[in-house]
Image: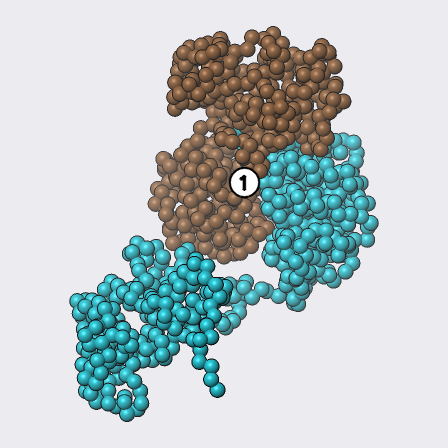
Amino acid sequence: MVGSPRSPGAFGLSHAGQLFTRETQAIFYNWKQLPVQRMLDFDFLCGRKTPSVAVIVQPGSHGGFQKVFFGREEVAIPQVGTIEEAAAAFPKADVFVNFASFRSAFESSLEALKQPTIRVCAIIAEGVPERDTKQLIAYARQHNKIIIGPATVGGVQAGAFKIGDAAGTLDNIIACKLYRPGSVGFVSKSGGMSNEMYNVIARAADGIYEGIAIGGDAFPGSTLSDHCLRYQNIPQVKMIVVLGEIGGQDEYSLVDALKAGRITKPVVAWVSGTCAKLFKSEVQFGHAGAKSGGDAESAQAKNSALSAAGAIVPGSFEELEGTVRKVYGELVGQGVITPAEDSKPPEVPMDLGVAKKLGKVRAPTHVICTISDDRGEEPTYGGVTMSELMEADANIGDAIGLLWFKRRLPRYATKFIEMCVVLCADHGPCVSGAHNTIVTSRAGKDLISCLVSGLLTIGPRFGGAIDDAARYFKQACDAGQEPDDFVEAMKRKGIRVPGIGHRIKSKDNRDKRVELLQRYARKHFPSIRYLDYAITVENYTLQKAANLVLNVDGCIGALFLDLLSSVGMFTPAEVQEVVDIGYLNGLFVLARSIGLIGHALDQKRLQQPLFRYPWDEVLYTK
Amino acid sequence: MARKKIREYDSKRLLKAHIARMAGLQLPIAVAQVKEATNFAELVSASPWMTQTPLVVKPDCLFGKRGKHDLVGLKLDYLQAQEFIAARMNKVVDMDGIVGKINCFIIEPFVPHEDEYYLCIQSERLGYTISFSEFGGMEIEENWDKVRTVTVPTGGEASSERLAPLLSTLPPELRPGMERFIASAYEVFLDLDFSLMEFNPFTLDSAGQPFPLDMRGELDDTAAFRSAKKWGDVEFPLPFGRTMTPQEAAVHSMDEATGASLKLSILNPKGRIWTMVAGGGASVIYADTVGDLGYAHELGNYAEYSGGPSTAETHAYARTLLDAATASPDGRGRALIVGGGIANFTDVAATFKGIIQAFRERAAAIQASKMKIFVRRGGPNYKAGLDMMRALGAELGVPIEVYGPEASMTGICQHAIDYISSFDKNGGQ
């Protein structure tokens, strides 16, 4: 990496000349992808050999890299946590581009100015307190450093170096021929207007050599006249264009410099804000420093003073372009300017995102999603916005309906789903899932580990029977199989009928949950064909043993078949798909997560120690 | 925004509290504020000094020269003060051409005095100037040659050596006290992010304590993030005489609530050229250009948006501006200039989205006022933005002329003028 050929500290503001070269490198503070990429794109257009950003300072980071494009290649720009580290590691990076917020711009800028290797500090933030900027100005003056900003987009030296977002898009850089030096030095307060003026100057002359926006604050770090004096010292700058603004006294130091003969190059100047006389009371325009106030700070007064001091002042902003053209033409005529040759800059490949936006390329997606969308004003589930859900007093069943079944289910159905969740949320501490969760919680693990260790027990022997129950009941019922034939056929295959049987509950001691679900379904469901079938199966199995009752898994499985078949929103093939994919165990997983989280938290709250089986509860044997 | 004027009441309240905190100076300041809604009895019971001393009452509305306009009540008791205020509350006065309503008063103890001193601390680019005179008061301008000024460079202290030139003609026994007051006021100035602090005049009370008779202050409101706590419940009133239309008030409150900048000043509600311009620099130039072309009298407003407002913000902003621009149609055509320079990084299409939404909602009003819209903008994604504008014209049946960076920035001002003048020539189109 090659730095500036000048030694640090060789610049005083009054005798400073060129700030940047084609080798200048910057320390970029507070990582922002776009401005860094724009700086590197500019570098590539200019044919620079090295990227203009040497290192990124990201407060709080501990090293690493940021990836950006340099032309067609991707490069990794190192990242460090402090300005001191950055300056020590990259002593040739003598420009500090500060993208800190207005809250922290002062501290970071002062820290940067204190590094002996840093010469120029550009401060982008708008709203830096005056007192802070003044301290930076004082420090910079004592140590021969240059501040650009605050409240600025920065500046650009054509063909050499660009600060952050200055000069806009690639199209604009090409339109303004900023990839190669022209003959005009430009300075303005406004960042937005500087870009406009690069266009004007490219149309009316051969483009800028350098352009700086000093920022709209009342006390900018460097002034219009500071930069005009620099331009006087840069031989390639043949004429100077200044765009001033109402408010402040800054233009008068330019007037003084002109009068004292310290600036001899032609200066075309215009101070905007002649409209201020239209306002009845004091007005604050868009820029902090642009305040209509005293007579001397008026645009009219400053334009007259500049004109009297020898600047070329047009009659209005509209005439500015013509004036630049005229002065440029005269300088070409006198042989002072040899118009810059036009070269064709290399083409910067288009970013994929931009190309896609323009419809120039297509790229395959990696993932497909049909249930939700987080891109709009508010997220949606199955096309239904959060607001609509809240207004409709949506419940868990609505969310499940939209995200699992992709349907806006009727109220009775969502209520049923919610009942299933409530009834299956927990079943005491002794079941395998809760036990695992309790043991894990007592081992001091985090909530997610506790939950997951409990969930991992859900399967063929614990809680995983809803899908299977639905599957077999559906198959048998749809085939019109008699219950006894069904049960006996299963027995022959060596399969216990899923959804039938309970460890404790029996014919005379029914599972309350099963009763409640059945009662609800009988009242609200259009049809309970599958439940009726499951009950005939139960009637048969109860003849074999009193505990072969329809259990909660079987009941939910059968009722879900009834729900899907009778709600009028699913084709038979879709109902089959639900059963085949295995939606219904999800219901148990979801419900039981509530209970498992409860057990995990309960153990933590009770500060239970590590669980360990006593030896006498284990059979040790060979 | 930056430097903001505060009321005399707040200036004195802040000085009293913080000069005590920072320098241990207990100034004999006591202030009470009366606005239209103030309950006077409650104010008196909260400020018992009001019943114990003769009072001075003045309007506190950011204008000076109050003595010259019979607006100062001297040596009143609290009941007389109440009457004095009641007789003047909401009175419209003309202060050197600026007409406005008086809606806020300050009440202070009356301090008999002979000496009137002048002190002013100002912030400049390279430091702070401190000006002092023994001949303060209403005639300060006539006595300006007797004002002495010293400069404290940024980071420097208001030391005895630096302040000495200010006090050289003061009787020696007064110098230490005066120096301490000036140095302490300077400390408060810095610590509270004042950008102006002026006493014209202050005096010394019977105990020899500095007492500001009249005080002006400005705070740098960009320092709010660190100084708001010290400022307490400070108010930043509008300049005297500046009343806000409902639309201006709406934009003003939007501006205060966002990190972006949204400005609207109505210049002439019946004006036929309206502007909505992106960027602090460009917005001023558009207003200039309409004036340069001789149509200042038709300019309806000054408006500026910048700093990356969200789509929702530009939408609300544009809708509010349109409400003002399309009010009371007179059949003589109007022009809206949606202008801007070539943006550095603002996504033009994104900001236009909000503006277009507003155009759609206000399409009927736009048509009713025979408004034609002139657009000029460049920058990131500008082609898409301009295309959206063109399509909108066709969709709404509203005439819209659209230009990009190839056209000069202010060229549409002339187009706008041509459009409205065509009504004057032909009696309508």
Seen from the viewer's position, the closer of residues B53 and A367 is B53
Neighbourhood count class around disc 1 (C-alpha, 10 Å): few under 14, some 14–19, many 20 upward: many
Residue under the image location 22 percent in, 83 percent down: A545
Outermost residue on the left side: it is: A523
Q: Is residue B213 above or below residue B358?
A: above
The colouring scheme, among rainbow, by chain, secondary structure or one colour, is: by chain
Camera sees residue A470: no
Q: Position of residue B164 (x, y in %)?
A: 74, 19
Image position, residue B356 (x, y; %):
43, 50
Q: Which chain is cyan?
A: A
Quarter occupied by residue A405: bottom left
Horizontal side of A322 relative to A15 (left or right) equals left
Residue ID for mark 1 = B283
As helix, strand or loop, the secondary structure at mark 1 comes to helix
Please, what is the three-letter code of the amino acid marked with disc 1? Ser
Write down the chain letter for disc 1.
B
Closer to us: B213 or A98:
B213
Place of residue B200 in the rendered image (x, y in percent of width and height, measured from the top left): 60, 17
* Coordinates of residue A336 in the picture (x, y in percent): 79, 46
- Chain in brown? B
Residue A297 appears in which quarter of the rendering?
top right
Which quadrant of the figure has residue A143? top right
Along the viewing direction, whichever of B45 and A200 lies nearer the viewer: B45
The structure residue drawn at horizontal position 50% and vertical position 34%, both measured from the top left corner, is: B295
**Residue A612, can we see it?**
yes
What residue is shown at x 45% (from left), y 12% (from top)? B51
Residue pushed farthest front? A616
Residue B347 lies, with reference to residue B211, above or below; the image says below
Q: What quarter of the picture does the N terminus of chain A occupy? A: bottom right
